[in-house]
Structures are given as C-alpha cells and as structure tokens.
Amino acid sequence: MKFKTLLLSSMILASTSALAEPTHRLFATNEKDNTVSVIDSRTLEVETSINVGQRPRGIGLSPDQTMLYVAISDDDAIAVVDVKTLELVKTLDSGDDPETFGVNPVSGHIVISNEDDGEATFLDPKSGEKLAVVQVGIEPEGVAVSPTGKYALVTSESSNMVHIIETTDYTAVAHLVVGARPRGLAFNSDGSLAYATSEIGNEVAIIDMEALKVVKKASIDVENSKPMDIKVSPDDKMLYVTTGRGNSVAFLDAKTLELKGNVPVGKRVWGLDLSKDGSTIYTADGVDGTVSVVDTAKQERVKTIKVGAFPWGVALDD
Amino acid sequence: MVHLKKYGMFLAFIWPQWLMANDIDVTMHYIGPTEGQVWLGVQQGIKEANLQGGFLGQKYKVEVVEPEALDKTNVETVLLLATDDDYIMKVAQSEQFAETPVINLISRNDKLRQACIPNLFHITPSDEMRADALAQWNEKNPDKPAEVMSWHKDFVKFAASQLNNRFEKNQGEAMTDQAWAGWAGTKMIADSVVQTMQYDAKFMLNHLKTNLVFDGQKGDNANFRENGQLRQILLLVDNNNKIVAEAPLRGFEGGLDSLGKVTCK
C-alpha cells in the first residue's frame, strides 16, 4: 500500500514536472535580422523580439517545454532560452553550421544537422556534451526523432536520402533514397510511419518504420510547389506541407497522399508548426517576413503577423 | 537434409539483398582535358557520387578515353564529352552510340542543339540562351551592361553556396561555368542510378529524355528540352563581377523556356 502511494505520488510528480504550464507563446526565427520574434498565440500580437545570435534557423522546444532551442548557424551553436523569462540561459557548441535539429522526446537529446560537414551531431543539452557525430550525406537538412526516441531521421539534400540512425548506439541502420532535395521530416503519433518532403522532386514519401522502407511516393499538385516542412495532424489522417515558392500549405491525405486542400499563405513559406489540438497551423513566410495563422478546419488563413526579416521556422509552446 | 533446407532458405532470403547492395559499379566514360575546370567539375561529381552511392554499396568512377580508342571502348552507361563541336557531332551520330547518352558538357554552339540528335544532351546553356538572357536584362536595364554566366562563385541561392563551398574546399579553386557543367553532367547520372538502380546505357538514355528529376543547385528541376538542352536559370553579372539578376527576369513569360529554343521544329 505504502509502495503504491509512493508510486502514485512520484508519477504525479513526474507528470507535473514533465509538462510546464504552457506560455502559449509562438516563437519565430528571423534568419536575416538575427532575432527571434515572440508572439502571444492567444492574441496573435507580437510581444517582443529577442536576440540570440547570428543567423537563427532551426527552432524547437525541450520535451518539458521549459526551454526553447534555436540553431544559431553562423555562431556554430544552439541557443537555450527560458520559455517563461525569455532569458538566454546558455549556448551549446553544436558543431559546424547547424541548420536545424530534432529533439528526442524521451532522452531530451538534440540531434543536429551540420550542413557544411555532412554530419549529424547528437548533443546532451543538460551537460552540453557531444554524444556522437554520425556521417550522413551531402547537405543534411531536416531532422526528426521518433516518438519512442528510438530512431533519428536526417535528410541529406544533395544526396537524395533519408538516413535512419538508432539513437541507442548512433549507428545508421538504413539509407533510403527519396525524391530530389529532401527537406522536412515528420512522424505519425505512434512512430510507425514517417514522412519526408522533397523540394526539387516535389514529392512526399511515406516510410514504413517497421520495414525501414519507402512504401509510397506522390507529387503535390500545386503550382510552383517546392515542399519544405511537414507536420501530421493529431489523428494521423492529414499531412500539412509548406510548399515554398508555391506560397501555400498543402493538405494531403496521410494514407493516399491525395491533395485535400491548399491554403495560400505568405511568399516563400518554409517552417510550420501545428497546435497540439490540431486546430491551427503557423507558418514562417520567408520573403513576406510574416507568420501566417491557418485554421485547419476552415482551410483558410485567418491572420497574418508581421515579424522580422526572412522568418525560417516557428515553434509553439501550447 | 534439414540443414540443407535451412541453408537454402537462408540463401534465398539473403541473395536478392546482397545483389542489390553490391552489384552497382558504374563507370562513366569521358573524352576531354584532364586538367582545368571541366575536369575538376567531373572529379567533384564523381566524389559526390561515391559519397552518395557509398551508403548504398555503389561505386562510381570516370574512365578517360583517348579518341583513337573510342571505337573499341565498351561504354556501359554514358559518354561525357568536353571536345570540339565536329567531334561531338560525329560521335553522337555514330552507330556505336545510337542507344547511349552522349553528353556535351561545355560547348555552347546552337547548331549542336538545332541538330536534334536524339542521344545528344547539352549541359551548358547555348549561345542563344545566353543572348536571350542578356536581351531580357537590356530591355529592363538599358544603361547597365552585364555579362551572362551559368554559374558564379558568389552564387548563394538554392544551396549554390554549399556547392561553391565544397567545390573550393575539395578542388582548391572557385567553381566556374565549366566546372559546374562537369559536375552537373556527372552528378545527374549518379542521381539517376540511385533513383532507378539501373545503369545500362539504353535505360539511361530513355530516363534522361523522359523521367529526369535533377537538382542542379540552381532552383527548379533541371531536365532536358526536346532539343537536348538542359533547362536552367542564368546569371547576369555586372562590370564589378557582382551578380545583379537571374534570368529569366521577372515579368517575362514562359519561365525557363523563355531562354533559347525548346523544340526541334
């Protein structure tokens, strides 16, 4: 009985420490003016902007959502910012030219793509220790870590591949060929499937994570489409893909890859994030210097927020 | 017996995978200078092909052929040429290469395109494409002289800077038009092998004509026109060697095909 109570209370403790009260802040990296815009996602007003280093690109949150991570490409670092106080807590050595990263939802480790070196760096943000450097193809870009934390996926843009790396021993277990210039990656909710976009191939590929094989590919029927970032709806039924110079978010059936909708947003749209309830998409519109807010049910843009120069990515603390 | 059966099952299981993982060993044949920019471009392309193919157990090499030995050479996949126009024309039209892709890397001569030889492809932009790019520029900027280039060491967009960086790091000099052409001709073949797992010349010829999706690190998908010319943007560079625009310029109809001829008509 005593043990049970102890277990229960420690479980509660674990769950409360696991997820901090969300700030509902939306963060956007502005690549060309070296700032991160902070937006209140409830009012959709810009609250402030913070300066974290030169050429901020990739952006994401720690699993407990207390820390914001930003890849500072020209400083070869990951900036760690307190989500509540907005203070720069520390900067971590990321290896050369970090473009973007994924966060392991279980271990909290950061997996970074080092664009100029053709490497993926595994980093422990608590200690700042580099755990491993894994050779991948030319121009690594997108990174995603599976929901169970078992696999890290890295795309290499100029080698046309998705590299699958086991996070326990940092070995690459598969190199899957996808369409030309692969960019973004996303997992479905249980990690059984992954999705990869290809910018020049104008494709989305479905990867079976049991078989470690590409099981389906389809092109996106949107004018000037150059697929970039991708997210999966919480019910796993829909894919949301930013189309770059297609200036839109394409809605694709997650199973058939059929185009189910196409919502115009700002020019040269790159990164996107999705609210946990799946109701709202936020996009970084590079050339327009805006963040677009898209209602997924209505399939329309409901708000455009002016941010800094060339927003690259967005992350929501909800 | 039981053992044998097991052994057989094991073989049956492992054999196709073993084949797929190891059986691709690609030789690209090349006639042209073995020093200077176009050769460095070919070297860079092969280096990247091996980096990419290495993950899949594939190997790539370039074999230099002397013109006098060409008729005795078995060209399995592709023949890359950095030679004079008459030689390109002669080789491409020979019976020996009727079903082999012959790639003209650096000649800009319009006549080679207008000949519309079905197995002949052209990487570098033609004289006519360059003239059209300049005409577009002059129409909008009559007082600012500019020169047309297909590549530039300061080109940054579409991950061009990444290609410039790695070329200079590996080859010890900046990438120019000719180096880009050497790189593109080689890399496009390697990318096609990786995508299709095939490298037979006849297959490659058909693939280049109908299914090519190639990232030349110049933006849009670079594929071939009916006349064998590679679609691509061009750069306008001013007197100070500064990139001032990309052609097609904004406001001109027809996209990439607003530069030069497209069909064989």
Image (cartoon, coloured by chain):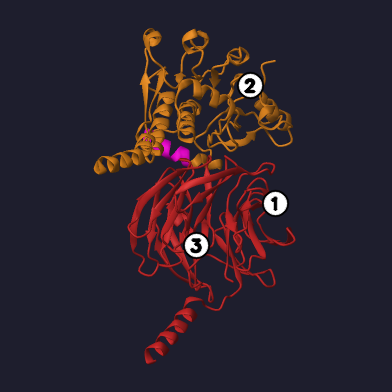
Chain colours: A red, B orange
Q: State whether residue B93 is above or below residue B220.
A: above
Q: Are marks 3 and 1 on the same chain?
A: yes
- SS type, badge 2: loop
- SS type, badge 1: strand
Q: Position of residue B94 (x, y in %)?
A: 50, 8
Name the side, left or right, on which A93 lies relative to A82: left
Chain of the residue under the numbered disc 1 shown in the image: A
Q: Are marks 3 and 2 in contact (CB under 8 Å)?
A: no
Q: Position of residue A195 (x, y in %)?
A: 54, 52
* Number of marks drawn: 3
Q: What whole-number distance in Å separates the C-alpha atoms at marks 3 and 2?
A: 46 Å
Amino acid type at mark 1: Lys
> Mark 3 — residue?
A70
Amino acid type at mark 3: Val
Q: Position of residue A103 (x, y in %)?
A: 46, 63
* Residue located 40% across and 88% down the image: A4
* Residue located 56% across and 36% down the image: B218
User: Which mark, by number, is residue B226?
Assistant: 2
Residue B196 or A291: which is nearer the viewer?
A: B196
Name the side, left or right, on which A48 lies relative to A115: right
Q: Residues within 10 Å of mark 2 (few under 14, many from 20)?
A: some
